[in-house]
Amino acid sequence: MSASAQSRADLVRHTVYEFALTTVLLFAVVTLVRWLALPGSPLAITDPHTLFAVAGIAVAVLIAALMYSPPGRASGGHLHPGVTVFLWACGLFPRRAVLPYVTAQLAGSAAGTALAGLVWGEPVRRIGYAAVHPAAGTGSVELFLIEGCALAAVFVAVTLVMTRPALRGLIPAVIGLGVGVVIATLGTVTGASINPARAFGPALLSGQYEHFWNYMIAPLAGPALVGLAHRALSARRAPEASPAEA
């Protein structure tokens, strides 16, 4: 097999992994909402702050576990279009793979949400397929800025770990922890989607599109800006790190 054919085969395999991983993520998230947020559920948590704190812990562990899994290690375990865009902006991910990865992640979002609907039935329809909503009174601009800046902060932490080779194995844990903290702290304000794949499937299946574009674009804008800034700073530091000319 030629190098180009091998490269295409790897891309197809990794794209399938991204689809499968995101399917598992959304199935788990919708299942979590079904059991913790549905009134009358034996596991229902009525206090919103406690609900989002528990959800944040669960999602943090889930994301890290999926990224550390063999399929996650093979594909990079992006599970999030913002991660793909961030790595591309950093110059660490090929442009030709961005669209296949993002398409697989969004398809996995729809598949995982639909699977949760098939498994749990009416309860999932009653929670609107876990569609994300901000708190009453949260405006579009406020929602966009909070979601975008919160995720940008997570990726600033990721860049700090990325630049230290001895710590790179912690990146999945850092991403999981960062997402968990955002869910726990901002969930009662924005709904804490912070992932277009988190918003896409539930909106598609429920038909609830209020603030949809905020939830789709803000989690791309923040990581993209951080990635571009990291790339620019790395380019500036490179000549400084090279030996001085004699």
Image (tube, rainbow, N blue to C red):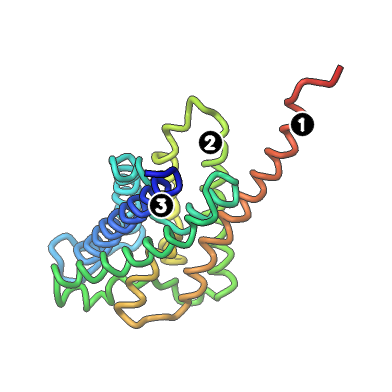
Residue 162 position (above or below residue 109): above
Q: Which mark identifies residue 8?
A: 3
Q: Of discs 3 and 1, which sits in the foreground?
A: 3
Disc 2: which residue: 162
Disc 1: which residue: 239
Q: Amino acid at mark 2?
A: Met
Residue 229 position (above or below residue 192): above
Q: Of discs 3 and 2, which sits in the foreground?
A: 3
Give the structural element (helix, strand or loop) at label 1. Answer: helix
34, 98: nearer the viewer: 98
Residue 231 at what x, y percent from top left?
65, 44
Q: Is residue 91 left or right of residue 14?
A: right
Q: CA distance from mark 2 to mark 1?
A: 20 Å
Q: Amino acid at mark 3?
A: Arg
Q: Earlier in the sequence, mark 2 or mark 1?
A: 2
Residue 126 position (above or below residue 80): below
Residue 5 at what x, y percent from top left?
40, 49
Q: Residues within 10 Å of mark 1 (few under 14, many from 20)?
A: few
Residue 9 at what x, y percent from top left?
36, 50
Quadrant placement of the N terminus: top left
Give the structural element (helix, strand or loop) at label 3. Answer: helix
Residue 126 in which image quadrant: bottom left
- The residue most toward the front is 1
